[in-house]
Amino acid sequence: MAAPPVVDLPLVDERLAADLANGLAAVEKQLRASVESEDSFVTEASRHLIEAGGKRFRAMLVLLAAQFGNPDAPGVVPGAVVIELTHLATLYHDDVMDEAPVRRGSPSANARWDNTVAILTGDYLFAQASEILSDLGPELIRIQAQTFSRLVRGQIRETIGPSEGVDPITHYIQVLADKTGSLIATSGRFGALLADAPTEVTTRLTDACEAIGVAWQLGDDLIDVAAPTADSGKTPGTDLREGVQTLPVLYALASDRPEDARLRALLSGPVAEEDVDEALELLRANRAMAEARDELLRWTDKAKKALAGLPDIPAREALIGLCDYVVERSG
């Protein structure tokens, strides 16, 4: 089975490119096998998002991190499958909470069936991930539990919003670190640990991957505003229509400049369809976009600083290239 498409990451080293392609093909095969059940409906529901595609971004990070140790170690591919199953499970749950009708260009599980099926399927994927994890050792089980705790805390924080006296921007960045950064950090950590990389290398990869994860989501925030077309896979202004206060919106709302009054009024809640174009035009021209981009750059710089201390191998250059890609894709 061919490996799925990954991010447009330039890999100048042919051996690394081949290792990643082979590793991702193995991950894809085990991923599909891991959700097979005697009950055909459980298998169908579990494979729904797997077959919808996806970049397997987190699995790729597991494989890249493993390059700093023994990339052929037997636990590396199962570890990547655990990470991918965990990510997919959160998507089933997210779609229920967001009432999302579409995921990866296909009807979401909750739209195709119902919320109960989607929630239970997500639970099943978590269970399958745990079963695989049980063969990888107690340390990884502990790390996965801590990661899952952060994922849930991040979702709770996002749901209830910032507490009184807490800066909304600080709160938002913490939500991103927990909801997105934590599992991407664990991707790097799993790959390094399962490949028996040195402790300092594992720590640096964990820190770098978390920073990349936060930066990636901040890039999505910018794309939702700046993308002139739907080429990014998202209709521009989707977050505005849904009333999601991303970082550019939060910076704009924090402005006390009189000339931003109209924009603040538009962004005070979900933007009506007839006002979306105006809101996008005003936000694109507002300094809030530059402030949000500066925050993204702080996170990619943080990732590069951690990566700079790693052994000089092709995988390090690939990860540094990924940092540059995160910036470039944001426009």
Image: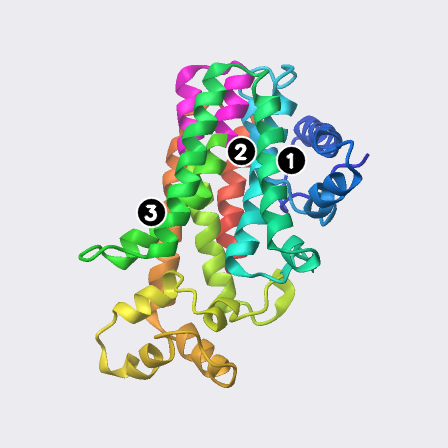
Cα separation between marks 1 and 2:
9 Å
| Label 1 secondary element | loop
- State which mark lies toward you, 1 or 3: 3
Kind of residue indicated by mark 3: Gln
Q: Is residue 301 magenta?
A: no
Q: Which residue is mark 1?
A: 12
Q: Quadrant of the N terminus?
A: top right
Residue 189 in the magenta stretch? The answer is: yes
Instruction: Determine whether the residue tagged by mark 3 lies in a helix, strand or loop.
Output: helix
State how many labels appear: 3
- Whether the residues at callouts 1 and 3 have beta carbons within 8 Å, the answer is no
Residue numbers of the magenta segment: 187-207
Q: Are marks 1 and 2 in contact (CB under 8 Å)?
A: yes
How far from the left and from the top, in percent, is residue 100? Answer: 58, 61
Q: Residue at x 50, y 29 (%)?
A: 188
Q: 129 above or below 243? A: above
Where 237 sits versus 92, above or below? below
Amino acid at circle 1: Val
Looking at the image, can residue 32 be seen?
yes
> Pointer 2: what residue?
317
Q: Is residue 142 above or below residue 214?
A: above
Residue shown at 42% from the left, 42% from the top? 152
Q: As rendered, which of 235 and 65 lies closer to the eye?
A: 235
Label located before the other in sequence (2 or 3)? 3
Amino acid at the residue labelled 2: Glu
Residue extending furthest left? 165
Q: Which mark is residue 173?
A: none
- Residue 138: percent from the left, percent from the top? 48, 15
Of the image marks 1 and 3, the number of the one nearer the N terminus: 1
Estimate how packed mark 3 is, as few (under 14), some (14 to 19) or many (20 or more) residues with alpha carbons within 10 Å.
some
Disc 3 marks which residue?
174
